[in-house]
Amino acid sequence: MIRLVLSLSLAVSLIAGPAFAQQPGITGFLGDNARVQAEREAQFDALLNGENLRGWMQHMTTRPHNVGSPKAKENAEYIAGLFRSWGYETEIEVFHVLFPTPKFRELRVLKPIPFTASLTEKYVSEDPAILAALEAEALPPFNAYSIDGDVSGELVYVNYGLPADYEVLERHGIDMKGKIAIARYGQSWRGIKPKVAAEKGAVGCIIFNDPGEDGFFQGDAYPAGAYKHDTGVQRGSVVDMPTRPGDPLTPNEGATKTKRRFDPKKLDTVTAIPVLPISYADALPIFRAMSGPVAPKEWRGAMPVTYRLGGEGSAVVKLKLEFDWKLVPTYNVIAKMTGSTYPDQWIVRANHHDAWVIGARDPMSGLMTVLEQARAFGEMAKTGWRPKRTLVFGAWDGEEPGLLGSTEWVEEHAKQLGEKAVAYVNTDGTSRGFLFLGGSHSLETMAGEAVGAVTDPLTGVSLSERARSYQLVSGTPEQKAAAKEDSTMRIGALGSGSDYTAFIDHLGIASFNLGFGGEGEGGEYHTCFDTFDHYTRFVDPDFSYGVALTKVAGRLTLRLADADVLPFEFTRAAKTYRRYADELVKLADTMRDDTETLNKMIAENRYTLAADPKEKYVPPTPKDPVPHLNFAPILNALDALDAVAQRYGDAVKTLQSSGNALSPERAAALDKILYQSERSLIGEDGLPRRPWFRHLVYAPGYYTGYGVKTFPGVREGIEERAWAETGAQIATLAEALTRYAGDVDEAAGIVAGK
Amino acid sequence: MIRLVLSLSLAVSLIAGPAFAQQPGITGFLGDNARVQAEREAQFDALLNGENLRGWMQHMTTRPHNVGSPKAKENAEYIAGLFRSWGYETEIEVFHVLFPTPKFRELRVLKPIPFTASLTEKYVSEDPAILAALEAEALPPFNAYSIDGDVSGELVYVNYGLPADYEVLERHGIDMKGKIAIARYGQSWRGIKPKVAAEKGAVGCIIFNDPGEDGFFQGDAYPAGAYKHDTGVQRGSVVDMPTRPGDPLTPNEGATKTKRRFDPKKLDTVTAIPVLPISYADALPIFRAMSGPVAPKEWRGAMPVTYRLGGEGSAVVKLKLEFDWKLVPTYNVIAKMTGSTYPDQWIVRANHHDAWVIGARDPMSGLMTVLEQARAFGEMAKTGWRPKRTLVFGAWDGEEPGLLGSTEWVEEHAKQLGEKAVAYVNTDGTSRGFLFLGGSHSLETMAGEAVGAVTDPLTGVSLSERARSYQLVSGTPEQKAAAKEDSTMRIGALGSGSDYTAFIDHLGIASFNLGFGGEGEGGEYHTCFDTFDHYTRFVDPDFSYGVALTKVAGRLTLRLADADVLPFEFTRAAKTYRRYADELVKLADTMRDDTETLNKMIAENRYTLAADPKEKYVPPTPKDPVPHLNFAPILNALDALDAVAQRYGDAVKTLQSSGNALSPERAAALDKILYQSERSLIGEDGLPRRPWFRHLVYAPGYYTGYGVKTFPGVREGIEERAWAETGAQIATLAEALTRYAGDVDEAAGIVAGK
């Protein structure tokens, strides 16, 4: 579901250095086992073939395969058949989830210039069968879990629809009450836009693709080029995912057939106001009809029109939406290969198979690497290899509307997963260019090693060197500095946007999400133009990056599955968490200074004096001062974590140089404490206002949607100026970090034989 | 000529604080004379009337009045008549200058899609007489001092056409040889664009108005709004002004009728290649025809097209230009009021009267303040007042093509001016909003006082408080920091772009240039749409900012004319020059670090690894390392200046508190050393490669055109990596600063009676 781009805001920093490539050892493998493992990985690499990815992708993208469609079921059965043919114990696990689809969509400008939006994409394909399938089966552009509604009102252009954007509107004296917000896609996850618009008093919300970020401004439109067709519309969910993903009717529980469901009248995660996405072709006449103050420069896109804010007296639109609020089945494919030594330690490797329309890049490009990896492991199993730990492959359904399949599966099997799941590895839609990888920082060292061992298909250097070059040349100033000072790889923190969410955020299972990006960009995301043709012409024509991604994800899985000691390592996590803590201290200090400056400037009337007296201007109101916060509990817990992380590392080194192995009982006990350590970062009560999200180190932002907020309870407490809550969250986080340090301490004791 | 905007790049920082408003003293006035002066200024203010500005502007903008036109002569005679009617000794001084006008202009796309550019503005006026005058007399869009030519070649889009832009093209492997450059207006003075294009091998140059910076992107186009009409074209000079303004045929000498002229075949300041400006309406089909790599994001404007770089295989255009290379008369109006006490000390106050077309804002809005000030002084003279020093009012002709009138006048009267000119005060086209002021820093204190004493018409606070509010709220980070730490006014350094250039840069006469900006912006600059209608609807409808500017410029003039001791003050200049020196040290250090990083990154192949392997990419070549430079001579000279500046300030304070006056002889000697001190900053040999520019502290940049380079010899030496030259320029600058410190020391001695 998530769109993988290397952007300034992407919380990913991939900078593995040559150190790893030269390093003979592989974390978690003792003695000669590292060499054996390296040979096994070479065997794995040799089995991979891009033509498999191509063939499966083409086969599964001939018709729309959204959740609930016939083709989604067919694809699930096809995938299950493949897994079975490769020797996996395979089942299709079905959940029954709420999935509204459009019954009626209307958007009209009533005045000053009447206009009716087409709300239709122009299908493009050289294959008449695909054209026919699109005509017959494609879901039209809509936002899933918009509420039904029939509203009209004056338009207000709200830029990206972030809270800060409404402050700008307030400076212009524009009130949102009774208005219809028109927001451009970008900068936040789309569901934030109607959420904030409704909070501000809007009665409806329109989201459009601005060609400045998604269209001709970037390059030729499809089918001539990769970029967004004038009629292209990004579909997508607007369910309140930062509060809770999964089936809205069955919070915290698997949506099995017999489950007693939450009252559909009390749905708490659908939007408060109707919302509809439109194309640039439909947006242009609407902007032409708008009046009001000229939008700030940063708000203007690439449509050939003067962008205006609208407001009182501006164009009036009518938005009418009705949906069919029905239950649909989700077909999750689950395939297992039981571990020889530790059958009750599971490594889960998956991606979703449902799409918004034809879905070649999203999700098939990522799913293909799951399949090719599973196929190769199946081949390896035929030569006598068995993983030490159990492998669980998954192909989720219903990811697009709200991570439905994976979330219901995780909720249904929460107890079992809580006990057994070592890690989760996810690869959603991918492209070519530079590998990005987000995940749990206790696995940063092993991830760096795995990435450093794979070669970039087009340049011949390691993937980590290529990514580091990107950081050094094109990174943000922070990324450049980090890449300069540190030649080893840093992984990003996970927000949300794909199926790892329930694993890491709800259960505390260490997770990875990875893919390629930065090249092969286009405008097909969540449109009818995300096709096999588009992917093979513009994205990864020879699937060489698909194969490279398989190599990385395959290594992550293999090393987790076969390690003598699970490859967790804590000094890098400790360093990373220290950076997060430093950020929080700085955030509070900066806010304190900024608040003082703001209040002084208001008192001195500076804002009004700097504004054009001939235009309406409302100065900001003073903010409450930022108190000094006691961060000591967090800092003390991090000091403790530093010490035990070092102790664990030293103990492992001593073990390795001793040439001894751990006894089977000690090894099993160590593994368990290692992979369970991530659970210690879970808070029982979850985050404020969203108890489903329980990880205290990583969460999607309440007002970013996909974008991560690290130490989210504390950070969002500060950002929202909820000082008492921040104090409580500091205590909660410090307790979790102390628990975590305790786990590491226990692990060190086991290794040291104490 | 210059367009006055408050932009990030504007080297002006106006932050006068309330300190001045409360300060009873006026620098330069001893004892009770400060009170007398304040009363005189109140009398002056009371005489001013915006209706005069309106009437004169309307009268002088009924027909095109470019240099050489009948209306320019009529206006000169009208202005002379006004001065005479107010009691000034007035003459019209005529020079005969080279002014080429178009005989033939053709721009055609030859392939892939033939298109012929209209090269025509659509005239707009409700007054049929004005429409008829435009039809009959307006100069069509062209760039003055483009060479004749008939060239064709493939187009390359060069962004703003700065040297750094060509580095980007080199990374794409695009060679300029034989190509035609198409550059957008902005970021540099327009003449830089063909200059650099020719240096890189282009055979022609087209400059267009991008609507992203100058058109519908900003607001409604004229006549509905203030912004650029689709057919609007910015005319303007492309003579090599950073090398030498004025008549190209008579360098360093006044272009009197009988002057033996420079060989027209050897013209050294016309362009090397033909160049033509075009409108957005003409540019769009040209961009539609272009192919090649997509332009970098920062290069793209607001035309509804994918911006491409062009190059080999891209669209081919033909550009044919022929000009009538003729001499025309320039009519400079000079009006004098002889000083009662020091007739041989001149305060010069002026602006130009010629325009590109109808020219209401540029130049009339600035010239009107000259006239109204002169009228009021005339009224004051009728009540018995006479200035102590001689006032010289000027209305220059031929500014637009190359500061012709003022430069010829300065060159012709160089000896007299060198002896007598105390200061020059210039007000070119002005708007409303925030006062900006650039000038010589030895007059910064008196300028801050004058600005602080005038009230903003719309908000009622002092102009300095309003400007400081703008800096605090909307300034660059540096401006914000400066405005926070320092409540007194800093003035900007002067580059070029209006008639102060010859005064300050060639002769070393302390100068000011001031006006309002930041509000009332539009797209009329150098087009046929710069009309009385435009000005009075969108810019300064009631001329209240015109009157406010008259008050400021009037105070500057009056205080210089009537001070007991000329209001020069050196501690602020010393501080400012110290900042420039610090910048140079930092510039060299940063360049050294950047060069090291660049060379290391090249050696490690980082640039190639960060580039998309599917696109052509040429990595940069290594640069020579930056040596450590000896800045000590400058720093030592500045230490000396600090000390003597303090000594002079202390001596003046002592004199003031003694209640004594200076003897007439000492006062005259002091004045002379004070106003001659700026001459000490002149270097005999001028700047490298441009001996006409002789000021060693301020100059327009060789590659910015208008934008200032402070300590230009040293700064441009570093920027151009000319290390030996930089060393020599450090010595030259240090000598000048030492001379300057010597003057200040001498002045301190006179005040102290030693």
Image (cartoon, coloured by chain):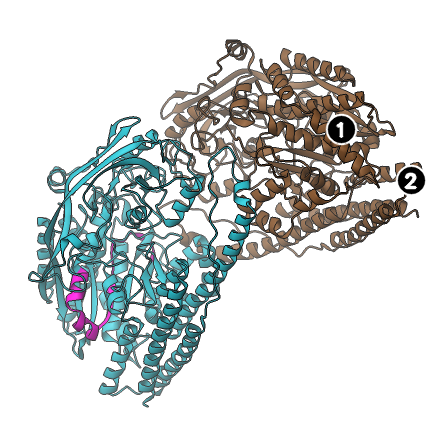
Chain colours: A cyan, B brown
**Whole-Å distance between the Cαs marked 2 and 1?**
24 Å
Indicate whether B688 appears above or below A378: above
Q: Is residue B512 magenta?
A: no
Q: Is residue A429 magenta?
A: yes
Front-most of A208 and A670? A208
Kindly identify which residue carries mark 1: B348
Kindly identify which residue carries mark 2: B666
Percent position (x, y) of residue A174? 39, 39
Counting other residues with Cα less than 10 Å from the Cα at mark 2, is it few (<14), some (14-19), or many (20 or more)? some
Q: In this rendering, do the residues under marks 2 and 1 share a single chain?
A: yes
Percent position (x, y) of residue A374? 17, 64
Q: Amino acid at mark 2?
A: Arg
State which quadrant residue A52 falls in: bottom left
Counting other residues with Cα less than 10 Å from the Cα at mark 1, is it few (<14), some (14-19), or many (20 or more)? many
Q: Is residue B23 left or right of residue B299?
A: right
Give the quarter of the figure containing the C terminus of chain A.
Answer: bottom left
Residue B429 in sight from this viewpoint: no
Indicate whether A562 appears above or below A689: below
State which quadrant residue B92 falls in: top right
Mark in front: 2 vs 1: 2
Residue A112 shows which numbered tag? none
Q: Which residues are magenta?
A: A406-435
Chain identity of mark 1: B
Q: Amino acid at mark 1?
A: Val
Front-most of A6 and B692? A6
Percent position (x, y) of residue A577? 40, 69
Residue at 65% x, 45% y is B17
Chain identity of mark 2: B
Residue A427 in sight from this viewpoint: yes
2 or 1: tag closer to the N-terminus: 1
